[in-house]
Amino acid sequence: MSTSVVQLLVVAIFALACGALALAWMRGRLGTAALVLFAVCVAVWIGAFVGIAKGFRGADEFATCLDDCGPIHYVSAVAFIAPPLLIALAALAMLVSRGQRWRTRRALAQQNHG
């Protein structure tokens, strides 16, 4: 297995997710985008676990296929590795969104009090 392919795919997916979250933040939809990213990643990770546990077309051999790796091995490797990273990114985006709302409400309350 060429780990550089898996690494490149994980980095590309992470960069796309960062770009999508940045765009959502600029449009005021960071919280919604973070929740959607979280839900999709959890679903993909569950799917990867099920595929690996059931041995779907040899998906359980993604770590040991060495030179005879097929597309299913690469897909299962990326589906197993990328979701935890993206779940952490979604959690950070949720915290940023929540903090932004909190700061806005606090500023509005201070404006109304004096």
Image: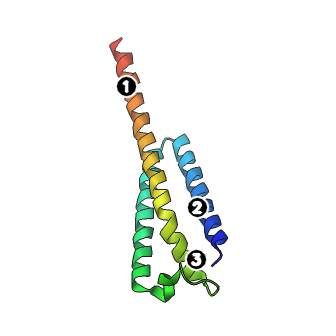
Q: Quick one: label 1, few (<14), some, or many (20+) residues within 10 Å? A: few
Horizontally, is 66 left or right of 76 in the view?
right
Image spot of residue 50 (x, y percent): 39, 78
Measured Cα–Cα span from mark 2 to mark 3: 14 Å
- Mark 2 or mark 3: which is in front? 3
- Residue 86 vs residue 110, the one in the foreground: 86
Above or below — where is 104 with respect to 41?
above
Could you say where residue 25 lies in the image, as x and y percent from the top left? Answer: 52, 43
Mark earlier in primary sequence (3, 1): 3
Q: CA distance from mark 3 to mark 1?
A: 48 Å
Which residue is depicted at the point 57% across and 84% down?
65
The structure residue drawn at horizontal position 52% and vertical position 47%, both measured from the top left corner, is 24
Give the camera-side residue of 95 and 24.
95
Local secondary structure at mark 2: helix
Q: Amino acid at mark 2?
A: Ile
Q: Which mark is residue 106?
A: 1
- Packing grade of label 3 (10 A; few <14, some 14-19, many >=20) is many
Residue 60 tag number = none
Q: Are marks 2 and 1 in contact (CB under 8 Å)?
A: no
Can you say which quadrant of the picture contains the N terminus? bottom right
Q: Residues within 10 Å of mark 2 (few under 14, many from 20)?
A: some
- Of circles 2 and 1, which is in front? 2
Q: Which residue is mark 2?
A: 13
Mark 3 residue element: helix
Q: What type is the residue that disc 3 sits on?
A: Tyr
